[in-house]
Amino acid sequence: MASSQDLIASIALPADLVERLLKAALDARQHAHAPYSKYFVGAAVLDEHGRIHAGCNIENAAYPQGWCAETNALGHMIMGGGRIARAVMVTGAGSEIITPCGGCRQKLREFARPEDLIVIAGDASGVRAHWTLEQLLPASFGPDHLKN
């Protein structure tokens, strides 16, 4: 398995930017509200202006009323004036590599071209894997389908 530094070097973003995304997502993870699953998630979205917007998961006793970390990060991006997601870092804990859930993949699709969005998985040890959204959500439906 490749080291975190090797994986960072293989991402089409400057290494310091990947590190900033990882830090923002890990910091956001510390604020997660996950009393039911005990699975704390942090995410950080890079917008078209180079700004980073972070979010954490917020569970709710009335499933499925909770919010995923990626959803919160996208909300912060929109509130901050961003409209295009360039990269997203998702962080969790455990031996399995975290990826956005299906709903979050579709939410990310709303704000990015699948072939352009870099999705990065990380944890406290560093970057674990990365993909394009196209690889995680092939043949997706998006805003371009609704244009006349």
Image: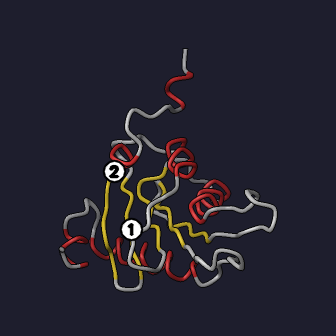
Residue at point 51% right, 23% down? 145
Q: Is residue 35 left or right of residue 116?
A: right
Query: Which residue occupies the extreme top position in the image?
Result: 148
Q: Quadrant of the N terminus?
A: bottom left
Q: Position of residue 96 (x, y in %)?
A: 39, 72
Q: Quadrant of residue 118?
A: bottom left
Counting residues from the start of the chain, the first of labels 2 and 1 encountered is 1
What kind of residue is marked 1? Ala
Q: Is residue 57 left or right of residue 64?
A: left
What kind of residue is marked 2? Thr
Residue with the mark numbered 2:
132
Q: Position of residue 104 (x, y in %)?
A: 55, 52
Residue at point 57% right, 53% down? 82
Mark 2 closeness class: few <14, some 14–19, many ≥20 residues within 10 Å: some
Mark 1 closeness class: few <14, some 14–19, many ≥20 residues within 10 Å: many
Residue at point 49% right, 58% down? 100
Q: Is residue 78 above or below residue 137?
A: below
Q: Position of residue 134 (x, y in %)?
A: 36, 43
Q: Position of residue 69 (x, y in %)?
A: 59, 66
Q: Is residue 79 left or right of residue 101?
A: right
**Tag 1, which secondary structure?**
strand
Q: Quadrant of residue 128?
A: bottom left
Residue with the mark numbered 1:
121
